[in-house]
Amino acid sequence: MTDGRSGFVAVVGRPNVGKSTLVNSLVGRKVAITSPRPQTTRHALRGVLTIAEPSAQLVFVDTPGFHKPKTALGERLNRLVSGSLDETDTALFVLDATQRIGPGDRLIAERVAAIGVPTVVAVNKVDVATPAQITEQLAEAGGWDFAAYVPVSALNDEGIGPVVEELITLLPHGPFFFPEEMTTDQPDQLLAAEIVREKYLARLRDELPHSLVVVTDEMEAREGGTLYVAATVYVERESQKGMVIGKGGSMVAAVGTEARLELETVFGVPVYLDLRVRVEKDWQRREALLDRLGF
């Protein structure tokens, strides 16, 4: 493959600072679902950006938000973040410009500094922050002595070019890891499941999103060019099952329609989406079940 600068960039930060939105903006297409709910990201998803001049390939690893875990799932997500940092060439540390830097941010800064990985700090959400908030964030974060600090708005694609430029200078020289046209190594089955979960996150009450996971059971091309996708929505309680299905099936029908339309855009073919709902009691706390669900 083409030689230039190439490497893995771990995208880290507290929950809900906009990491996934920033990765999508950097890559130029949707590779990770987004939601205002904390802990939306549950897998280390890779988005790939390849540029011709200067010749470079950046592999962004979108990680879950580092947090104080309350379940076995939470413990696994934190280990995922730590593992991504241990195996990365550089880090992109995302802060929320609208919130004061807190203990969680400082903990991540200490972890990144201890590993010694070159780091760019992106102060995100500058489109909704005041100039005073942005200045305060940059001033305090500057004390960490990282490689660069860039104000950005992932939502409006502001500051994306400078972030990429700063990261490229930190990457080692070497061959590309992926074909130049590739934008993610995420399996289609995982992307389909995550799109369904994203639609539920937008509609459900605060207490339920953490109890919900979606798994794609089957995906195949059928006659006439239709893509058949069968997915199961898992929850932890019978009462949650009713919420996910909705009165007269209204919730699952609405989510199914929204997800199907997006899947048709992503895959470029008609999609038949078959959703099922199943209860797996306390799945977040059951190690064997977490293995089976892909965590």
Image (cartoon, helix red, strand yellow):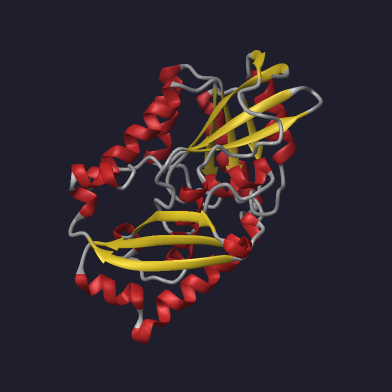
Residue 115 x %, y %:
43, 18
Q: Is residue 176 above or below residue 36?
A: above
Residue in the picture at 27% in, 45% down: 292
Judge by depth and name the residue closer to the eye, 108 or 250.
250
Going by the picture, which residue comes out furthest to the right? 53
Locate residue 82 relative to residue 91 in the image: left or right.
left
Quadrant containing the C terminus is: top left
Q: Picture quarter containing residue 37?
A: bottom left
Is residue 168 or residue 216 the one in the foreground?
Answer: 216
Residue 101 position in % (x across, y down): 46, 42
Q: Is residue 157 left or right of residue 123?
A: right
Task: Residue 76: name its quadrant.
Answer: top left
Taking the image as drawn, is residue 69 in sight? no
Q: Is residue 106 visible?
A: yes
- Rendered view: 91 above or below 64: above
- Percent across and percent down for residue 274 are 43, 67
Q: Quadrant of the N terminus?
A: top right
Task: Answer above or below: position of 172 versus 50.
Answer: above
User: Which image quarter: residue 227?
Assistant: bottom right
Identify the residue at the far front of this view.
223
Q: Name, please, the residue furthest toward the bottom.
A: 248
Q: Report how many numbered discs are placed on residues in the image.
A: 0
- The residue depicted at 45 percent of the width and 77 percent of the height is 253
Who's the residue at 55% across and 20% down the image? 118
Depth check: 121 or 35 in front?
A: 35
Q: Vertical placement of 167 versus 95: above or below?
A: above
Q: Nearer the viewer, residue 293 or 13?
A: 293
Residue 234 in the image: x percent, y percent? 30, 61
